[in-house]
Image (tube, rainbow, N blue to C red):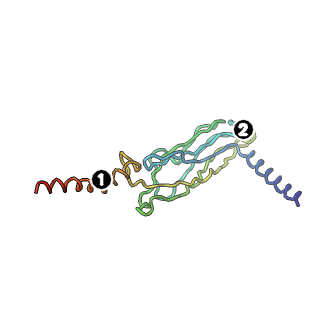
């Protein structure tokens, strides 16, 4: 029984290693930050092995319905790969129509990007190949208290102005008006 499990595990490892050794590029997709409701997304690629075996790299990305590209491009002809990571970075805005006071956050999955390239596997053989990045979960939040102060300071300040300040005014105003009457 143990021998059978070991053989199956060994076959799985061999399949994974042989699949990854056939790929001339390594690709990834990630959300690197958020500022003011704008999320920064980057799709990266790098050569695995000899970089000269890859040319004509193109990145084809897409967004869920309703998302807007603020800056950058979803479809680009990328630079020649090297063993260092190369990135296509763009910024997106989450649609505000999906937010409400009850629903201030929601999670959406950004679809995988396609990385298409020409693979030079032998001297006379050039073939177009496609790799897909990982999908990326994105949690979008709606900041009710935006502006200069942000939510962390605005909540106590608004609470003080609405609740405490009127009580203090009444506490000191009532004796003053009683003395005047």
Residue situated in front as seen by the camera: 71 or 40: 40
* Residue 103 higher or lower than 143, as above or below: below
Q: Nearer the viewer, mark 2 or mark 1?
A: 1
Q: Which residue is mark 1?
A: 161
Q: Position of residue 170 (x, y in %)?
A: 23, 56
Which type of secondary structure does the marked residue at label 1 adopt? helix
Judge left or right: residue 155 versus residue 39. Answer: left
Image label count? 2
Question: Residue 9: which disc?
Answer: none
Q: Position of residue 76 (x, y in %)?
A: 54, 44
- Which quadrant holds residue 85? top right
Label 2 neighbourhood size at 10 Å, few (<14), some (14-19), many (20+)?
Answer: few
Q: Position of residue 110 (x, y in %)?
A: 55, 54
| Quadrant holding the N terminus | bottom right
Residue situated in front as seen by the camera: 120 or 91: 91
Judge left or right: residue 135 versus residue 167. Answer: right
Which type of secondary structure does the marked residue at label 2 adopt? loop
Label 1 neighbourhood size at 10 Å, few (<14), some (14-19), many (20+)?
Answer: few
Residue sitting at the far left = 181
Q: Which residue is mark 2?
A: 49
Q: Residue drawn at (89%, 57%), measured in percent from left and top?
A: 3
Q: Compute the Cα span from label 2 to label 1.
A: 64 Å
Which of the two labelled residues, at mark 2 and mark 1, occupies the earlier sequence position? 2
| Quadrant holding the C terminus | bottom left
Q: Position of residue 12 (x, y in %)?
A: 79, 54
């Amino acid at each position: 029984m143990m021998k059978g499990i070991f053989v199956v595990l060994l076959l799985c490892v061999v399949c994974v290693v042989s699949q990854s050794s056939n790929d001339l590029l390594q690709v990834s997709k990630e959300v690197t930050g958020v500022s003011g409701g704008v999320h920064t997304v980057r799709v990266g690629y790098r050569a695995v092995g000899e970089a000269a075996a890859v040319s004509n790299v193109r990145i084809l990305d897409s967004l869920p319905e309703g998302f807007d590209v603020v800056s950058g491009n979803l479809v680009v002809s990328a630079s020649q790969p090297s063993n260092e990571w190369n990135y296509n970075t763009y910024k997106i805005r989450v649609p505000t129509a999906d937010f409400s006071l009850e629903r201030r956050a929601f999670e959406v999955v950004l679809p995988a990007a396609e990385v298409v390239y020409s693979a030079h596997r032998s001297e006379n053989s050039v073939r177009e190949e496609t790799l897909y990045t990982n999908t990326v979960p994105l949690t979008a939040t709606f900041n009710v208290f935006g502006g200069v102060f942000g939510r962390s300071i605005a909540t106590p300040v608004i609470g003080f102005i609405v609740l405490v300040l009127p009580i203090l005014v009444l506490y000191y105003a009532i004796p003053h008006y009683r003395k005047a009457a």
